[in-house]
Amino acid sequence: MRTFQIKGIIISKRDLGESDRAFKIMTEHEGKLEIIAKNTRNGSSTRNGHLELFNYATFFLYKSENHTYLNQCQTITEFTRLKSNLETISTAYYAIEILDKLTALNDPAEEIFTLLLSFLRELEQNPLKNETILLAFKTKLLYDMGLLPSVIICDSCGNKLAPELIYSPREHKFHCRSCQINPGFGGTTISPQAIKLFYFLQKTHLSNAIKLKTDQTLSQASKELTTLLDIYLQENLGKELKSKTISYNL
């Protein structure tokens, strides 16, 4: 039986059997792991205070042939301010739901761990910017996972910044108005401002995203980009995510 320690962020938990719980943690070097914490539902375990959603902690684990079990854990950061605000809790829960559904177990992804940790830190420090932080997180997550194009361009003529481009979910392609072959297919419109925002959020750190000045132009571009990202999410997940406003137990 192998023992080891690892740092990670708790992204989900569920009851298991009569007295145990299973947790998913996103780690820096091992990717997403599922661990089992024995006897943590009886209310007396000293580990329970360390096993809350969003906690960044050090986990002391041991591995059998089929499962990984928790021995002890020690919290590094609880993100207390984040958890004291209903809006930031809701935003964080929505983000980790997306991450959990898009990632596989035991698939190392250092950039995704780093993105998640940065996301929680920025949300903790800048609760009034939660919508901007979430948009930046979604853009970078989908891009880092290879689920977004690196360049938004008309598939027919190669125009990068037409007055507007239309994304057709049926064709999985962008077209400018003059090249839109099947307008009956519908689609979502994305303006040059939204495309520029898309490129900016791809490359910049989350701490730079919150420095964007909120005005009418940015607000409209953010709405367009959010709509586009949600279409890509539905295409890759095959179903809608839960609403950000749902209640849950930390």
Image (cartoon, helix red, strand yellow):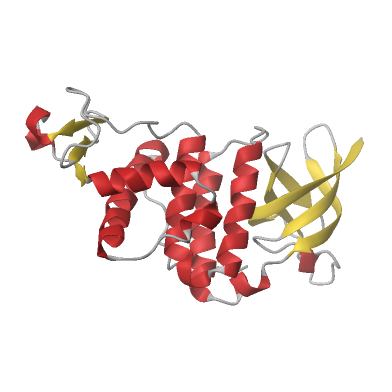
Res 175 quadrant in image:
top left
How many marks on residues? 0
What residue sits 78% from the left and 69% below the top?
Answer: 49
Q: Give the x, y percent position of residue 227.
A: 29, 50
Q: Is residue 18 left or right of residue 39?
A: left
Q: Give the x, y percent position of residue 203.
A: 48, 41
What residue sits 30% from the left and 43% below the top?
Answer: 195
What residue sits 10% from the left and 35% below the top?
Answer: 177
Residue closer to the observer: 56 or 174? 174
Residue closer to the observer: 122 or 235? 122
Q: Give the x, y percent position of residue 206.
A: 53, 53
Residue closer to the observer: 72 or 137? 137
Which image quadrant: the C terminus? bottom right
The answer to whether 14 is drawn above or below residue 153 in the figure is: below
Q: Is residue 235 left or right of residue 211?
A: left
Q: Is residue 248 left or right of residue 244?
A: right
The answer to whether 182 is drawn above or below residue 196 in the figure is: above
Question: Taking the image as drawn, is residue 198 in sight?
Answer: yes
Res 186 quadrant in image:
top left
Q: Give the x, y percent position of residue 208.
A: 51, 55
Which image quadrant: the N terminus? top right
Question: Taking the image as drawn, is residue 239 in sight?
Answer: no
The answer to whether 245 is drawn above or below residue 231 in the figure is: below
Res 85 quadrant in image:
bottom right
What residue sits 21% from the left and 44% below the top?
Answer: 188
